[in-house]
Every structure is written in C-alpha cells, then in structure tokens.
Image (tube, rainbow, N blue to C red):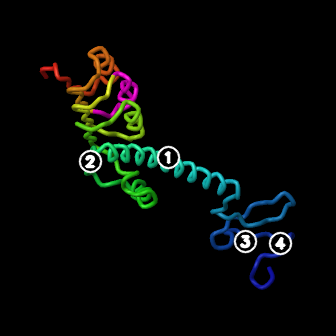
Amino acid sequence: MVGGRYKGVNQKPPARGIQGYNWVMSDQGEHRPRRWLQFRLRWLFVLCTLCAAWLGWQAQQALDQRRALRMVVRVRGTYEFEDAPPSTAQAIVSKLFGRMGTHEVAAIYLQGTTVTDAELGLLAGLKSPRRLSLVSTAVGDASLTALARLHSLECLDLRFTQISTEAVEALRHALPDTRIYRWNDTD
C-alpha cells in the first residue's frame, strides 16, 4: 500500500474492503471496487421513455376531457367534478394541464340543450361520469354507440328524447349496471 491506499496489481485488497466498497475481479485479474448504485445510460433512457409515455397518455386523456367539457359549455349544459381529493399523480398532472382536463367528472346535465348525436361522441373522452341527463334533447338512435362506451354510468336520463324503445333496450343490454330512465318507465 502506498500512502494508505490500495494501488497496484500485485497487492491484495484489504479483507473488509474500503468503506462501502466490495472488491470484484476484473477481466485482467485486477481488483477494483464495485459501486452499489451504478446505472447505465440505457436504463436512464428507458426510465425517461416510460415517464414520457405516461405523461403523453395523461395529456391525451386531459385533452379528450377538455374537448368534451367545452362541448358541454358550448351547448349551454353543465357538469360537476368529483368531490374526492386528487391522488398525487392527478395533482401533478393537474398542475400541468389544469383542473378541467384532469379531475374526474361526476355528472353532465344536457337537458333542454341543442346537443346533437355527433357531439355526444365527444363524451367518450370522459374518464368516468356517473350521471348523464339528456332530457328534452334532439338526440336519436345515432347516439347509441357514443352512449354505450360510457361504462361508468350509474344513471342515464333519456326522457323526452327521440331514441327509440329498441335502441333503449340495446343500450340496457350494453350497460347492464346503469339505470336508464325513459318517459314510459315506471321505475
């Protein structure tokens, strides 16, 4: 040892190693310390790629939700957000994209508005609305595909719409956990 440190190929390392290092043999027969926290550049790239993919997915969901809520405001409807506090990930994304794009929508009220079947297709961009009211609107059977994609609905009010009875039955089959109200229903 020279100056209290391990140097040279012919000298053996101390039995316990040097504070926090384990000794390993290299391909040339040299002893060198192994670092516990050692990352390769490719793993850093993989980690950055995964974070970017997650952020891009969150951004797309926020954009879809903003489009749907802007449509609701444009046709003079209203909406409500969930009362539950956001998770840590939602709080981070909320700072980036705003509340309108990140908080979960609890209810959408479009009764008496001028919403069309094509505009209802934008509602598929919502994460989990529980209630949707389409009372006294001009929506018809063409909106069935958009409504069938809202699996999180608990209550759907279709009173005084132009949706046929056959379409309502098909919708009840597609959304079995949803209570669907029609003008001729007694429940």
State the residue position of label 4: 11
Q: CA distance from mark 3 to mark 1?
A: 57 Å
Q: Which residues are magenta?
A: 141-153
Q: Determine the CA span between mark 2 and mark 3.
A: 68 Å
List the residue tagged with mark 3: 14
Q: Secondary structure at mark 2?
A: strand
Q: Secondary structure at mark 1?
A: helix
Mark 1 vs 4, N-terminal side? 4
Residue 68: percent from left, percent from top? 39, 43
> Disc 2 designates what residue?
80
* Dot 3 crowding, Cα within 10 Å, few <14, some 14–19, many 20+: few
Q: Marks 2 and 1: CB-CB under 8 Å?
A: no
Distance from the alpha carbon under mark 4 to that under mark 2: 74 Å
Q: Residue at x 44, y 56 (%)?
A: 97
Query: In x, y percent, where is residue 159?
Result: 20, 27
| Mark 4 in CB contact with mark 2 (< 8 angstroms) | no
Graded by Cα atoms within 10 Å as few (under 14), some (14 to 19) or many (20 or more), the crowding at tag 2 reads some
The residue lying at 25 percent from left, 51 percent from top is: 83
In the displayed image of the protein, which residue is found farthest to the bottom?
3
